[in-house]
Image (cartoon, rainbow, N blue to C red):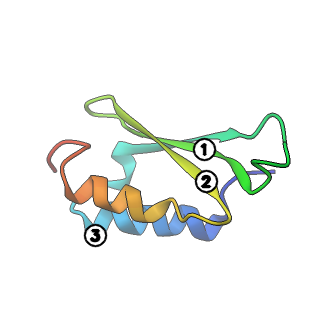
Amino acid sequence: MYLLSQSEREDFEELIRNAGFSETDFELIEIKEQSASIEYKSIRGAVIVRRKSNEIKRQYTVSHIEPWLAPVEDDLLNGEFGKQ
């Protein structure tokens, strides 16, 4: 079972394209939650976004309460992954 749904993956690819990048230059690495606790039960894991051409990586929390795609979009538009 994958951490991210197919629609989340498609939304990620659309963000990449809309920011002027090629989706083939990016990789998603899923990190599933290893232990569940009452305090962090809403956290499902994390995703690392890696730009292949320059090896820039950033990690985002994937949870039911906080969307992860909005921070990715902000980072793309603010140059955190480099220029197109």
Q: CA distance from mark 3 to mark 1?
A: 23 Å
Q: Residue furthest top?
A: 55
The kind of residue on which mark 1 rests is Ala
Residue 38's label in the rendered image is none
Q: Is residue 41 above or below residue 10?
A: above
Mark 1 neighbour density, 10 Å: few (under 14) some (14–19) many (20 or more) = some
Visible residue check, residue 21: no
Residue type pointed to by label 3: Asn
Q: Residue furthest left?
A: 83
- Residue 34 appears at what percent x and percent y? 80, 34
For residue 81, what is the image quadrant? top left
**77 over 44 or under it: above or below:** below
**Of residues 57 and 63, which is closer to you in this image?**
63
Which of pointers 2 and 3 lies earlier in the amino acid sequence?
3
Label 3, secondary structure: give it: helix
Residue under label 1, please give it. 46
Location of mark 2 (residue): 62
Note whether 20 is above or below 35 in the view shown: below
